[in-house]
Image (cartoon, rainbow, N blue to C red):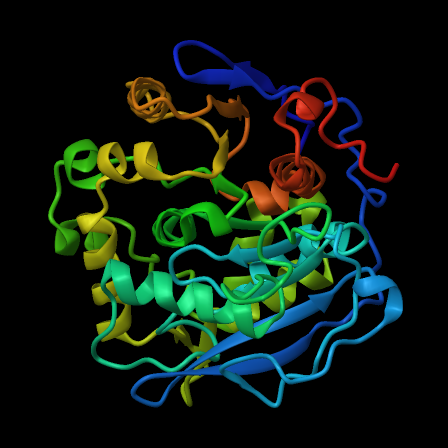
Amino acid sequence: MERSPVLPLDGTGLEALVFGNRAGPAGPKGDPAAEPAGYLVAMDPGVRIHFLDWGGPALYDGTARAGAAPRGAGIPARPGRSDVPGVLLIHGLARTAWSWSPVARLLRADARVAAMDLRGHGLSDAPTDGYDPDQLAEDAIAVAEGAGLLALEDDPLAEGSPGERRFVVAGHGYGAIVAAWAANALGERCSGLVLVDGGWIDLPAETEMTPDEWLAAIAEPPEVLASMTAWLADREAFDPGAWGPDGERAARSEVVETAAGRVKLAIHGHALAASVGAMWTFEPRAVLPAVEAGIVALAARDDDAGRHLAALREVAALRAGAGRPAIRAAAFPGLGHDLPRHEPGVVAAAILAAARAAPEADRGTPDGASG
């Protein structure tokens, strides 16, 4: 796939996000040998949420703090520096934490990074309830705390300078909705919210569909599910140039093979329906103006009616009217929904821009954190 032009967005409540070096903060592909560790956070009543810990620079100048992470199952204390931000990555609908691998490889040179499996997805449990905004936000916050990305409210590093530990939550698609709920719930404990092609759209209004109708419209064709080979070939075809071991592992994590040799989505039907139901309850006009954190938005190709960008502009204007900082935004008119795969360096740069302490420092080249 050819490199897509970037369209900085401005207007009422919007500030153009300009990228200099699009290779990314730690080189074009990050560390290909890095492997994350998997952990579980236990929620009530006994629901386990899985996340991948990608690590990052050493915290507290190499001096580890005592004590295990709260709510974590066997999660060790993590050393590191107080100036290193924590970043939580949240995947899209029917995806898994592995979909963020290309971005996580880049970020880990400059941030402490974890990617979670949402409730009902990946290796997280799939209960029949808990797919409401409050619980989904609580799941994300518990992972952030358990992974050591987010200071506890009674932590001496939770507030103040220079010991303040900055936290950014980034989501893609459905994950952007959950990220927005989490950022809103965290208030001043969240420094930045990054919305990757989602999180600002009123889906019932834009689609004019019910959740069941939308699920039927996005269902995978039978030929794509005919075999694992067919499934992987279809995923590769979206962007052959970006396909590699990370893409294949992410694709394999999204399906299971049946005894007949076909594949089916790994997410259980009840969890998929409940997740889409949650998406249909999201009210961006109410949630985003209430978010205290700075917001960065990356938009993929718009629909023919231009509704995606129009929705972003509407929300940005509402946020400006509420006295919030402008949403820093850019669009990629030549790319589809999967921006973390198509442009991992740009997505990583946007997340680092959101993590910086002074918004003024982000104008110009937000991807210049380390090269």
Q: Name the residue located 20 percent from the left edge and 55 percent from the top edge.
A: 216
Q: Is residue 211 left or right of residue 105?
A: left
Residue at the location (77% across, 61% down)? Answer: 56
- Residue 70: where, in percent of width, then height? 53, 80
User: Image check: 283 left or right of 154?
Assistant: left
Residue toward you, 224 or 109: 109
- Which residue of the protein is positioned furthest toward the top in this rendering? 11
Q: Is residue 118 visible?
A: no
Task: Report which quarter residue 48 is drawn in.
Answer: bottom left
Residue 72 appears in the rendering: yes
Work out whether residue 60 or residue 275 is closer to the camera in this orientation and state it.
60
Image position of 92 (left or right of 328): left
Quarter occupied by the C terminus = top right
Residue 134 x, y percent position in the rendering: 27, 62
Quick check: 233 left or right of 260?
right
Percent from the top left, x then y, of residue 266?
40, 75
- At 44% from the left and 79% from the top, the residue drawn is 124
The correct choice, above or below, for 360 with respect to 268 in the image is: above
Q: How many marks?
A: 0
Q: Does residue 14 sit above or below 289 in this rendering? A: above
Q: On screen, 291 above or below 216?
A: above
Residue 33, position as x, y percentages in the image = 85, 67
Q: Nearer the viewer, residue 187 or 313?
A: 187
Q: Nearer the viewer, residue 323 or 96?
A: 323
- Compared with 137, 23 (above or below) is above
Please identify the quadrant where the N terminus is shown: top right
